[in-house]
Image: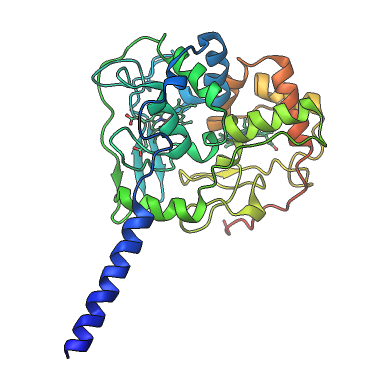
Amino acid sequence: MRFWALLLGIMTAIGLSVGIYFTQATPLYVATEPVLERGGNADRGRGIFFAGGCASCHATPGQSDPLKLGGGLELKSPYGSFFAPNISPDPDDGIGRWSTTDLVNAMQAGVSPQGEHYFPAFPYTTYAHAKVEDIRDLMAYLRTLEPVRGRAPAHTLKFPFSIRRAVGVWKALYFDRSPINPDPAQTDEWNRGRYLVEALGHCAECHSARDLLGGIESRYRYAGGPDVEGHGWVPNITQHKDGIGDFSKSDIVALLKTGELPEADSVSGAMMAVVRNMAKLSDDDLSAMAEFLKSLSARPSPPKPPK
Ligand code: HEC
Ligand code: HEC
């Protein structure tokens, strides 16, 4: 009896420590990092802001100014609803008191200044690949924007998805924050495009199918899948015949700039919000993104559910 009680005790202790180990939130920088706090070019940061599509989620809904980052947009998911927070420079309701180090920890480690995990509805799984210099410039830009009062509603997530600590397990399974190193076998244009698409544009976050726990299934990365908000289907953007194999590079640039598809139709919904951001990028950047997209190997789309 004693033996079993002891064994149970030991097993519980091991279970708890493994649990605590995997669920603790580890920031990249524990203290404010002086190098990150100096400088920062707001003009360059504006480019990072639009390439990263921050306004699509954080702009206050119901008004047209993409630079009013009061938050409040509802993002539906199979786990419940997330509400994008206020990231304007307001010191009380926004991130006005944040250091650049705080923003780096949020975007590259998915950890808040309070030391908690962020939910990956905030696509830090993509931004983790961004260069810290770019995040420093982005912070310089965010600080130039208008402070907006008011906080977004709290997320309404179903149990157990509401437990922030559990995001630690999710991160152990899916979060890869390795940097995107330039591939010397590819052109500078391709490398620039890859960086814009994979470290900022978060195209794969929508254009991929996910497994039951919400991780992107690698075989369906860029091959499209059901919309996470539960309505419709996000198209395949690989070079497969179901994808955009028949789009030329200039077709892709035109689409990102104007929303117009080659057959004189145009994209709608979530993609139109992406286009509003992409339209702010230079033609060289859009062309680089198109160059990278044209190199994605053809992957068949995941099976569609019966209608
Ligand atoms: C797809 C929607 C989406 C996009 C795009 C997005 N975010 Fe967020 N962001 C969120 C959500 C949702 C949260 C809340 C996460 C949580 O509570 O765990 C969040 C949280 C944050 C936070 C933490 C705020 C706080 O009060 O703790 C910051 C900072 C932030 N985002 C900055 C950015 C920046 C900068 C960009 C662009 C590079 C960006 N986000 C793009 C959805 C998004
Ligand atoms: C928030 C989700 C979301 C993000 C992020 C997103 N897309 Fe889309 N995209 C969509 C949806 C939804 C459609 C379908 C729009 C329609 O049919 O009207 C679409 C359509 C497209 C199409 C047209 C495909 C076709 O065959 O009609 C291309 C190309 C495309 N997206 C490329 C991109 C690129 C490049 C990025 C990254 C910069 C990106 N998307 C980011 C949701 C997204």
Residue ID at (21%, 88%): 3
Residue 268 shows up from this direction: yes
151 with respect to 249 (left or right): left
Q: Position of residue 157 (x, y in %)?
A: 31, 47
Residue ID at (44%, 43%): 120
> In this rendering, is residue 67 above or below 267?
above
Colouring scheme applied when the structure was drawn:
rainbow
Q: Position of residue 270 (x, y in %)?
A: 53, 32
270 with respect to 257 (left or right): left
Q: Position of residue 251 (x, y in %)?
A: 77, 26
Q: Which quadrant of the structure image shows residue 232? A: top right
Instruction: Give whichever of 242, 202 is nearer the camera.
Output: 202
Check the picture and name the quadrant holding the C terminus: bottom right
Instruction: Give whichever of 154, 179 is nearer the camera.
Output: 179
Q: Residue extending furthest left? A: 2
Q: Residue extending furthest bottom? A: 1
Q: Position of residue 86 (x, y in %)?
A: 33, 24
85 with respect to 53 (left or right): left
Check the picture and name the quadrant holding the N terminus: bottom left
How many marks on residues? Answer: 0
Residue 262 shows up from this direction: no
Q: Which quadrant of the structure image shows residue 306? A: bottom right
For ligand 1, give the image quadrant.
top left
Residue ID at (35%, 30%): 31
